[in-house]
Image (cartoon, rainbow, N blue to C red):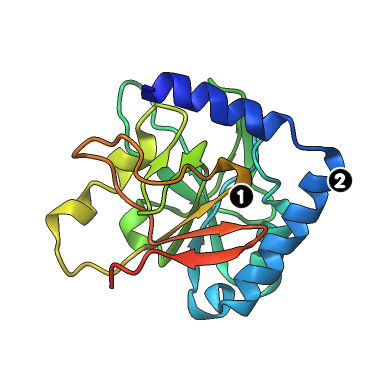
């Protein structure tokens, strides 16, 4: 099965979850993130707003903000570029919708991914080795490409956020430029892939 077919199958799985399952999962990821120490350990946190049938990250985002962390949301580049900017979430930020219909904040403080300590990442599917399938735009891989050039670079710590039903046993098809996750956060817990 190629990535396009797999993406479609995984999106269907995600859409079939009930409202109750979605609500419970959103609460549980916060609890698991707290228990694992993710929200205590890092100060500059990249997160994202849920879109479509993605797991609701708003309770997680609220907890991160409530702990006083500097929280950043991704913004698509203008033009043909692929590298995301991350805008600090602050009161009074201006909001717009990007070309995919995803809300973006426009704040005073804008950074690239390498200036973040922790990045929560959206995905469509993930495997046993930390590889993910996204929506196919390649924005996160392009934004994190610097991680391939520095062997001992420890920032940022990459955590995919998903429903457990998005797991694909074994190894997903991946390309040399795909950046693997350090951990996956689901309603079942935090699983670290152990590359450190």
Along the line of sight, the residue nearer the viewer: 23 or 99: 23
Residue at the image position 64 percent from the left and 66 percent from the top: 64
> How far apart are labels 2 and 1 at the CA level?
15 Å
Whether residue 154 sits left or right of residue 131 in the image: it is: left
Dot placed on the residue nearer the N-terminal end, 2 or 1 = 2
Whether residue 139 sits left or right of residue 59 in the image: it is: left
Residue 76 is at least partly visible in this image: yes
Along the line of sight, the residue nearer the viewer: 151 or 187: 187
Whether residue 160 sits left or right of residue 18 in the image: it is: left
Instruction: Mark 2: give few (<14), some (14-19) or many (20+) Cα within 10 Å.
Output: few
Residue topped by disc 2 = 20
Residue at the image position 23 percent from the left and 35 percent from the top: 175
Q: Residue 117 location, x and y as percent?
A: 41, 67
**Residue 190, image quadrant:** bottom right
Q: Is the N terminus in the top left, top right, bottom left or bottom right quadrant?
A: top left
Q: Residue 49 location, x and y as percent?
A: 63, 43
In the image, is residue 173 above or below residue 187?
above
């Amino acid at each position: 099965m190629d990535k396009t077919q797999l993406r479609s199958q995984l999106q269907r799985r995600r859409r079939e979850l009930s409202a109750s399952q979605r609500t419970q999962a959103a609460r549980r990821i916060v609890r698991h993130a707290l228990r694992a120490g993710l929200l205590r350990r890092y100060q500059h946190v990249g997160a994202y707003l849920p879109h479509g049938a993605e797991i609701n990250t708003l309770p997680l985002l609220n907890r991160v903000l409530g702990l006083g962390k500097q929280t950043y949301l991704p913004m698509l580049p203008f033009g043909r570029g692929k590298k995301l900017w991350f805008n600090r979430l602050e009161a009074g930020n201006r909001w717009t919708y990007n070309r995919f219909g995803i809300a973006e904040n426009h704040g005073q403080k804008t950074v690239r991914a390498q200036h973040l300590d922790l990045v929560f990442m959206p995905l469509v599917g993930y495997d046993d080795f930390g590889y993910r399938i996204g929506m196919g735009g390649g924005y996160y891989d392009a934004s994190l490409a610097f991680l391939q050039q520095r062997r001992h670079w420890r920032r940022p710590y990459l955590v995919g956020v998903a429903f457990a039903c998005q797991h694909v046993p074994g190894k997903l098809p991946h390309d040399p430029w795909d950046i693997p996750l350090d951990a996956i956060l689901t309603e079942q817990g935090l699983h670290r892939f152990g590359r450190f």
